[in-house]
Amino acid sequence: MKLKSLEISGFKSFADKTKIEFMPGMTGIVGPNGSGKSNIIEAIRWVMGEQSAKGLRGDKMQDVIFGGTSKRSPLNRAEVSIVFDNSDHYLKTDWSEIRLTRRLYRSGESNYQINGQDVRLRDILELFMDSGLGRESFSIISQGRVEAIFNSKPEDRRAIIEEVAGVFKYKTNKERAERELRQTQDNLDRVQDIMAEIG
Ligand code: ATP
C-alpha cells in the first residue's frame, strides 16, 4: 500500500485547496518555522479519525478550521482527503484505491467518506485496524514523541516496538483468551461441585 496524495482545504493554515502528491521513494517537507509542516501531518492524522483536539494542538475540534489571518477571513469548513494505492490489498478490502475524506463545519456538523460514500468513524477505524496505520499508531511520530520514546523506560520502549511490529494485538488477544479460559475453568469447577452435591 502506498500513500498517493493528500488534499487539504480550510484546515489550519491551509485556507486554499492544496494538493500534495507523494512520489515513489522518500518525501521530505521543508519550510521555515511556522509555515505549516506539522499541520500537514496533523491533516493526515485528522482524516484518519483523530478525535483529540489537544492531540492536534487545539482546545476544541473546530480549532482545526482555518481561523483567518489579518488579510483573510476565517472559513466555515475544513476538509481533508487522503488517497492510498491499495492495489496490493494490504488493507483488507476489494478496493485497489482508497480515498478517505473528512469534513467539519463550524456548527459542529461533520462527516466521513470512503470512496465518496458516507461512512461512520467506526468504518474508518475498522479499515485501518491491525494495519499499523491507525490514528494512534507509531507510523506517525510527532516531534515531542521522539524525545518521549528515547526517554522512556526499557519496558515501555519494548511495548512501542511490539506495537510497531504488530505483536501487541496478539498479546492482547492472548490475554483475553487466557481470561476467558480462567472464567470457563471457574464455571466448570462450580458445575462439578453442584454435580458432586446432587450426585
Ligand atoms: P515548526 O518548524 O516551528 O515546527 P511548522 O512548519 O511545523 O513549524 P505548523 O506548526 O504546522 O508549522 O504551523 C503553524 C502555523 O499554523 C501557525 O502560523 C499558526 O498560526 C497556523 N495555524 C494553526 N491553526 C490554524 C488555524 N485554525 N487557522 C489558521 N492558521 C492556523
Image (cartoon, rainbow, N blue to C red):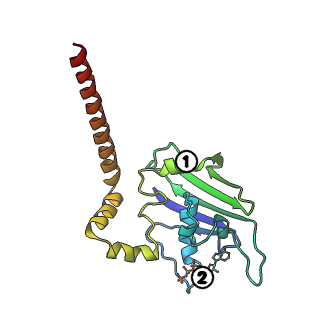
Classify mark 1: residues with Cα within 10 Å, few (<14), some (14-19) or many (20+).
Answer: few
Along the line of sight, the residue nearer the viewer: 142 or 107: 107
Q: Nearer the viewer, mark 2 or mark 1?
A: 1
In this view, 192 is above or below 139: above
The quarter of the rendered structure image containing the N terminus is bottom left
The quarter of the rendered structure image containing the C terminus is top left
Along the line of sight, the residue nearer the viewer: 43 or 4: 43
Ligand 1 near label 2 (Cβ, under 8 Å)? yes
Instruction: Name the secondary structure under disc 1.
Output: helix
Mark 2–mark 1 Cα distance, whole angstroms, equals 33 Å
Q: Residue at x 38, y 77 (%)?
A: 147
Ligand 1's quadrant: bottom right
- Looking at the picture, how far across and down is residue 189, in whole percent? 24, 28
| Residue 21 at least partly seen | no
Q: In this view, does 17 lie to the left or right of 194?
A: right
Q: Check the image and name the residue furthest to the bottom.
A: 32
Query: Residue 151, which numbered label?
Result: none
Amino acid type, mark 1: Arg
Q: Is residue 16 left or right of residue 45?
A: right
Query: Residue 122, which numbered label?
Result: 1
